[in-house]
Image (cartoon, rainbow, N blue to C red):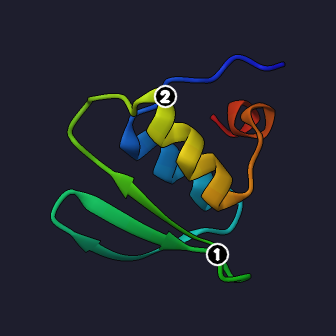
């Protein structure tokens, strides 16, 4: 089992853009991203703060990614 990475919001956005997610909108510090197959994720961007474990796991479920796939993208 791969270890869960600890990315910031900006790092996660860059990783998701590599696999086809695009930024749809931003409201405040939250960025909404969408894939062409209608997967949607919302990512908080709070400076250089890293994302919490539970939130990151929720984003991975929404994006249909595994921990290993995310590690490879980062």
Residue identified by numbered label 2: 53
Label disc, if present, on residue 49 of the rendered structure: none
Q: How far apart are marks 2 and 1 (CA)?
A: 23 Å
**Vertical order, 67 against 21 (above or below):** above
Q: Quadrant of the C terminus?
A: top right
**Splitting the image into 4 quarters, where does residue 25 fall?**
bottom left
- On the image, the x and y values in percent for residue 48 come to 26, 30
**Vertical order, 64 against 56 (above or below):** below
Q: Earlier in the sequence, mark 2 or mark 1?
A: 1
Of helix, strand and loop, which one carries label 1?
Answer: loop
- Residue at screen point 40% across, 55% down: 43
- On the image, the x and y values in percent for residue 11 come to 46, 40
Of helix, strand and loop, which one carries label 2?
Answer: helix
Label disc, if present, on residue 35 of the rendered structure: 1
Closer-to-camera residue (73/45): 45
**Vertical order, 15 against 47 (above or below):** below
**Relative to 60, 55 lies left or right:** left
| Total residue callouts | 2
- Residue at screen point 51% across, 39% down: 56
Name, please, the residue furthest toward the left.
28
**Between marks 2 and 1 in the image, the one whose residue lies nearer the viewer:** 2
- Residue at screen point 49% across, 34% down: 54
- Badges 2 and 1: C-beta atoms under 8 Å apart? no
Q: Quadrant of the N terminus?
A: top right
Closer-to-camera residue (7/41): 41
**Relative to 13, 20 lies left or right:** right
- On the image, the x and y values in percent for residue 51 come to 39, 33
Q: Residues within 10 Å of mark 1 (few under 14, many from 20)?
A: some
- Residue at screen point 36% across, 28% down: 50
- On the image, the x and y values in percent for residue 69 come to 78, 39
Q: How crowded is mark 2: few (under 14 residues within 10 Å), some or many (20 or more)?
A: few
């Amino acid at each position: 089992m791969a270890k869960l990475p600890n990315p910031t919001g900006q790092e996660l956005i860059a990783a998701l853009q590599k696999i086809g997610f695009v930024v749809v909108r931003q409201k405040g510090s939250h960025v909404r991203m969408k894939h062409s197959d209608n997967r949607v994720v919302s990512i908080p961007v709070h400076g250089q703060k890293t994302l919490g474990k539970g939130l990151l796991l929720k984003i991975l479920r929404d994006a249909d990614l595994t921990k290993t796939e995310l590690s490879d993208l980062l």
